[in-house]
C-alpha cells in the first residue's frame, strides 16, 4: 500500500466524522484524529462480514 493524500474537495461529515477520498487512488479515508487519516475497512461482497 502506498502513501495516501486526502483530496480536500471530497471531505464531508458523515456520522460525526470526516470522510474523504485519496487524490491518487480514490480510496475512502476517515479522519481518526485532527490531521491523521486512516484507510476505512470496506466489506467485500464475497467475504461476508469480514472487512478486507
Image (cartoon, rainbow, N blue to C red):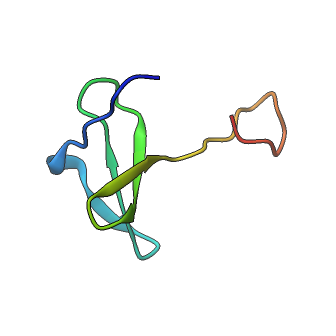
Within the image, what quadrant is residue 45 found in?
Answer: top right
Q: Considering depth in this image, is 33 or 47 the residue closer to the camera? A: 33
Left or right of 4, for residue 42: right
Tell me which residue sits at (47%, 23%) in the image: 1
Where does the image place residue 8, in percent across and percent down from the top left? 16, 49
Tell me which residue sits at (33%, 29%) in the image: 3
16 in relation to 28, above or below: below
Q: Give the quarter of the figure containing the C terminus.
A: top right
Where does the image place residue 11, in percent across and percent down from the top left? 25, 55
Q: Considering depth in this image, is 42 or 1 the residue closer to the camera? A: 1
Left or right of 44, for residue 10: left
Q: How many marks overall?
A: 0
Q: Considering depth in this image, is 22 or 1 the residue closer to the camera? A: 1
Within the image, what quadrant is residue 43 found in?
Answer: top right
Tell me which residue sits at (79%, 42%) in the image: 50
The outermost residue toward the right is: 48
4 in relation to 13, above or below: above
Left or right of 10, for residue 36: right
The outermost residue toward the left is: 9
Where does the image place residue 49, in percent across and percent down from the top left? 82, 46
22 in relation to 11, above or below: above
Where does the image place residue 34, in percent across and percent down from the top left? 29, 67
Amino acid at each position: 500500500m502506498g502513501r495516501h493524500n486526502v483530496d480536500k474537495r471530497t471531505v464531508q461529515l458523515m456520522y460525526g466524522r470526516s470522510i474523504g477520498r485519496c487524490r491518487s487512488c480514490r480510496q475512502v479515508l476517515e479522519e481518526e484524529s485532527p490531521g491523521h487519516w486512516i484507510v476505512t475497512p470496506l466489506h467485500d461482497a464475497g467475504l461476508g462480514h469480514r472487512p478486507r
